[in-house]
Image: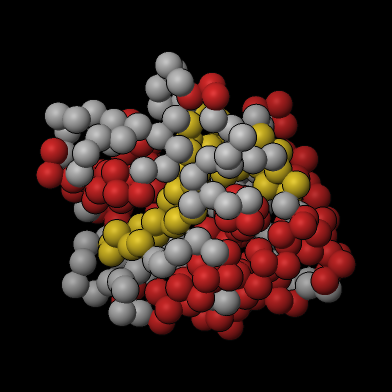
Amino acid sequence: MPVPSLLAVFAHPDDESLSAGGVLARHAAAGARTAVVTATWATDTGRAEELAEALQILDAGKPRMLGYADVWAPESAPSCARFCDAPLDEAVRRLVTHIREFRPEIMVTHDGYGGMPGHPDHVHTHRVTMLAAHAAGLGQLYPDAGAPWQPRALYLATHPHSAVKSLREVLDAHTQYVVPDKLYSVPDEQVTATVDVSPWLEQKIAAALAHRSEVERGALPGVIASLPPDVHKRLFGTEWFIRHNPVTATSAQTELTV
């Protein structure tokens, strides 16, 4: 059975590699079409250049960027609205255009918490993607955004409680990184897809490290760079998702490759 095409939608450059880099590489290796939409940062910035390099490593095409500003980095798109402040209908329409153009069978985005850190851009990306995944299939919505297309399933990148416990232990043992007291995660039983991405771990790590500005400022890619290679598999060799069906008629036949 052919591996389903996959469109990932994340808030910032580097989220795609950290949250779903293994799944993107896995689907591409199996011959599926893959692509990434990034909600923030302008195309003429250094972060966009790093994103292009990361996507090349993951074989996920060229950057597709909505062009909004990061809520905490106005320099990310100086002439544009912050993503969280932009009109919701406008943001949904922009994303619907990408969905209808790429025509993915499945989509991946942040969970309702916005992942472990709960970044407001992550949370808003979740909201916009949930709306756009449904709206893309409704022909009378956004008729200028292309022919209707309904993704069959939407997978929300998440972390189970057990993984957060392991992450704290590893980072405390191997780094001086201060793990925030509040991290968002879900009960283990809510996870519906646990994906072993260890065969693609080298690609995932290389893609994360391609975001050099984040490495240099000590964000999570920088933490990865400081870790011994034998720790990478424990921290990043598994990716977790919660499945959501935008529609019910045909979605049960389309699964994330696990």
The answer to whether 36 is drawn above or below residue 164 in the figure is: below
Quarter of the image for residue 69 reads: bottom left
Residue at (45, 64) in percent of width and height:
61
Quarter of the image for residue 126 reads: top left
- Looking at this view, name the residue that lies furthest to the top: 249
Residue at (36, 36) in percent of width and height:
133
The answer to whether residue 33 is visible is: yes
The answer to whether residue 217 is visible is: no
Number of labels in the image equals 0
Horizontal side of residue 202 vs 115, given as left or right? right
Quarter of the image for residue 243 reads: top right
Q: Looking at the picture, how far across and down is residue 42, in whole percent?
A: 30, 71
Q: Looking at the picture, how far across and down is residue 79, in whole percent?
A: 19, 72
Identify the coloring.
secondary structure
Comparing 190 with 7, the one in front is 7
- Looking at this view, name the residue that lies furthest to the front: 1
Q: Looking at the picture, how far across and down is residue 108, in whole percent?
A: 50, 44
